[in-house]
Amino acid sequence: MIACRAPGKLYIAGEYAVIEPGFPAVLIAVDRYTTAHVAEADATAVTSDLFGDKLISLERVDGRLVAPTCDGLDYVTSAIWVVERLLTELGHPVRQFRLRLTSALHDGRGMKYGLGSSAAVTVATIAALARFHGLRLELMDRYRLAMLATIRVAPDCSGGDVAASTWGGWISYRGPDRGTLSRRLRRDGVEVLLRENWPGLSVKALPTPTSARVVAGWTGHPATTRAEAGVIVGDDSCAGFRAASRDCVDRLSAAIEDDDPMRIREQLRRARLLLEKLDTATGLGIMTPELAGLCAIAESVGAVAKPSGAGGGDCGIALVTSDAQLTQLRDRWRAGGIQPLPLHTHPTEQDQP
């Protein structure tokens, strides 16, 4: 049996603006994982705690993967399709398999923490199936396959979570033009897109700061990025937000590289204010009362905090600079109904091919 895991993620800054190709975000990979187990089988099937541990049989009809409707299965079947399409284009045989997925990116009731479970599922599935079929993938190949699988399901996804789940550690990320990729995938297939340059795409590893620590808190309410978010943020009326977000993320990346906690704090606070202004202008529902409370509690102990990711629920992050501040923050969060998540950075050097 082959097993490959992919970490979850937290957005540090750059949410929403990163939906536009070429606009930056900073993310970290965290030590909560989805693991894909693949073994030889007589017929292809999938099982996972993500959808009730049911055994779901998959069929191939005229080269097309056919699967029953099941919540959470679409990213899995898309990842399988992309790998098998590449195998076919390369002239390699497609083998039957049993795929089992296990995840620590949700609570005991199946509620997602907002740590990028769909991306982790996709990246882990791609990695495991590629290894099962004898494909040797560089990290960029793994990202590209996972990104192609993702945009078949969610065309507006920036791919930041896919990149974090692929590279690990702290990264600065700028996404490609997904519309062009979707058209090219339908026209030219997978192998061509693995070999060609993707305009706008940039992934840069950042050092993990030693002078400050990121802490995550969960509101207990799962969030979903609104389908129209990409259209709203891409509108000319949001040009000022996009430009300010790019400047903020670029300054934040420089501060992280210099391990300067004051400048990191300054840009994180600025990132929150930008999201608040965007929320007021667009009604996207980014800053819920729970997330506002999470941020206010953090500020009350001298930390700086902001929503992480889509907002509207899920997670917020805070930056603390001492163990005493960390303890005080966690205690006050719990008292305020916020669940601190015991997360650490998933190191870049782990799980490399």
Image: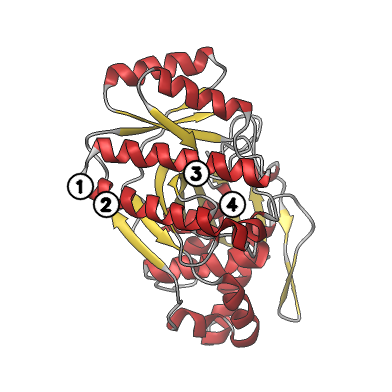
Measured in 3D between alpha carbons, the distance from the residue under mark 2 to the one under mark 3, in whole angstroms, is 19 Å
Tag 1: amino acid: Asp
Q: Does 190 sit above or below residue 22?
A: below
Label disc, if present, on residue 258 of the rendered structure: 1
> Is residue 55 toward the left or the right of residue 142 in the image?
right
Name the residue carrying label 3: 274
**Disc 3 vs disc 1: Cβ atoms closer than 8 Å?**
no
Percent across and percent down for residue 289 are 62, 26
Label disc, if present, on residue 118 of the rendered structure: 4
The answer to whether any part of residue 200 appears in the image is yes
Percent across and percent down for residue 17 are 52, 56
Of the numbered discs 3 and 1, the one sitting upstream in the chain is: 1
Measured in 3D between alpha carbons, the distance from the residue under mark 3 to the one under mark 1, in whole angstroms, is 23 Å
Image quadrant assignment for residue 56? bottom right
The answer to whether any part of residue 350 appears in the image is no
Name the residue carrying label 2: 254
